Image (spheres, rainbow, N blue to C red):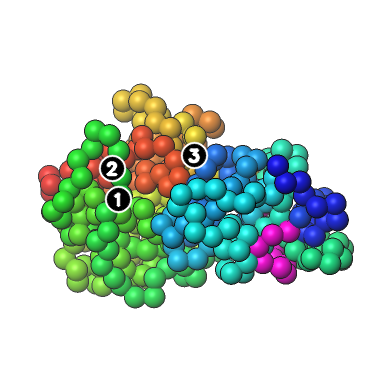
């Protein structure tokens, strides 16, 4: 196991003044962000390229990160979106049949800073206690750090509340998505023929969600986050998909919610939302969202489907949640987190309009929630 070098070349400063030193890898320089922790044991490339991580540095609680390198297939978007990464052990020389590049080189080429050799258990406890702290991360090979300036920079980070980041990561123009999943979970049928025209509104969509929609029989047209009701309807969709994405749902909702409200009141179409899409559907239906203490980021989160009592182990990445106390009449809570009881899914009582907080595309993560893509396709079959 390569140890961190004796002389620290990276420093992570929390806004409360706590400092963590380690060995820098990836890009040099400095960045500020909100700090979260992710408990997934694998899938660091998918995590770093998940657009929903914009504005966040990810602490990986699993200690061995980077050892399988990076490859051309696992990106969830073109570039890493997370602002940086914190790991326990420095990555070893990669060893995997798909590895095309070392994690550090890949991060450096994309301007992302990482720190290794950090006591991530202590840091994770700090994140839980402080609640998603604001931090500054510096990587400087000569090892000189102005720690006062770093703490000040951490304090200067405005935070994610009130921040619309979907505009930073959405597509510039519409496009068709045809690629299917490479593997399809057991018990499911890959639909070779597209049966339904779906407009996917891209607030920061992960590629594997689009693959899952295509594999469930959807002909997918992806539209930018700011697409208007008329632009959406011009594609004559059979159903609407609202994607995941970064930032505060209430801020993105400023332009997305009026569009979704019109969809609900004027077009009687099936709607399916994931994560940010779930939160914005809830806002459009009249509920409220709240900032969580340290969010849910991992690949082992148990979620109960309220109607059946069935438990699914899910992938999660969210720092905001729908406040189930605020769900209006006619909107049912369909899924709850078994970790903390927070809302994980809603549905309109009388229409095929539904959404989940967790990630059924599971990249990375377990495949238990794939049925939701089939449910969406079935709701369009029935419409
Ligand atoms: N993965 C997502 O879509 C995240 C949604 C939202 N930005 C949150 O943090 O809660």
Q: What residue do we see at 36% from left, 70% from top?
A: 224
Residue displayed at 50% across by 48% down = 96
Relative to residue 33, is residue 311 drawn left or right?
Answer: left
Give the mark toward the camera: 3 or 1.
1
Q: Position of residue 150 (x, y in %)?
A: 80, 63
Task: Specify whether 122 is left or right of 33.
Answer: right
How far apart are the two marked residues, 3 and 1, measured between alpha carbons?
19 Å
Q: Main secondary structure of the magenta part?
A: strand
Callout 3: 10 Å neighbours few (<14), some, many (20+)? many
Determine which residue is flagged by label 1: 181
- Which residue is at the front of the view, 298 or 97? 97
Find out whether the residues at labels 2 and 1 contact each other: C-beta distance under 8 Å.
Answer: yes
Exactly how many numbered labels are in the figure? 3
Task: Give the labeled residue for mark 2.
Answer: 184
Along the line of sight, which residue is nearer the eye, 245 or 368? Answer: 368
Q: Is residue 256 above or below residue 318?
A: below
The question of residue 179 being in magenta is answered with no
- Residue of label 3: 299
Spatial CA span between label 2 and label 3: 18 Å
SS assignment at label 2: loop
């Amino acid at each position: 196991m390569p140890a961190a070098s004796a002389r620290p070349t990276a420093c992570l400063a929390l806004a409360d003044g706590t400092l963590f030193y380690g060995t820098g890898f990836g890009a040099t320089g400095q960045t500020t962000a909100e700090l979260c922790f992710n408990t997934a044991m694998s899938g660091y490339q998918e995590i770093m390229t998940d657009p929903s991580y914009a504005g966040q540095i990810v602490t990986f609680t699993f200690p061995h990160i980077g050892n399988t390198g990076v490859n051309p297939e696992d990106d969830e978007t073109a570039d890493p979106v997370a602002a940086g990464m914190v790991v326990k052990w420095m990555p070893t020389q990669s060893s995997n049949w798909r590895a095309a590049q070392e994690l550090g080189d890949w991060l450096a080429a994309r301007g992302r800073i990482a720190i290794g050799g950090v006591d991530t258990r202590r840091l994770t406890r700090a994140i839980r206690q402080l609640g998603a702290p604001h931090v500054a991360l510096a990587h400087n090979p000569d090892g000189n750090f102005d720690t006062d300036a770093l703490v000040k920079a951490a304090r200067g980070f405005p935070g994610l509340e009130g921040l619309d980041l979907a505009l930073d990561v959405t597509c510039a123009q519409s496009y068709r998505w045809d690629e299917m999943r490479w593997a399809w979970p057991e018990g499911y049928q890959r639909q070779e023929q597209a049966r339904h025209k779906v407009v996917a509104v891209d607030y920061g969509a992960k590629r594997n969600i689009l693959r899952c929609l295509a594999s469930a029989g959807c002909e997918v047209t992806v539209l930018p986050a700011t697409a208007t009701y008329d632009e959406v309807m011009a594609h004559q969709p059979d159903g609407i998909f609202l994607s995941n994405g970064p930032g505060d749902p209430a801020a993105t909702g400023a332009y997305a919610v009026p569009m979704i409200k019109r969809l609900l009141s004027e077009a009687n179409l099936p709607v399916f939302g994931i994560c940010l899409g779930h939160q914005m559907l809830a806002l459009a239906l009249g509920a409220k969202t709240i900032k969580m203490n340290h969010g849910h980021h991992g690949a082992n989160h148990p979620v109960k489907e309220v109607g059946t009592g069935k438990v699914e182990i899910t992938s999660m990445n969210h720092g905001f949640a729908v406040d189930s106390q605020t769900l209006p009449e006619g909107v049912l809570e369909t899924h709850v987190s078994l970790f903390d009881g927070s809302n994980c899914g809603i549905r309109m009582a009388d229409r095929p309009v539904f959404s989940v907080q967790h990630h059924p595309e599971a990249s990375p993560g377990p495949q238990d929630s794939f049925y939701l893509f089939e449910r969406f396709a079935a709701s369009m079959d029935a419409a």
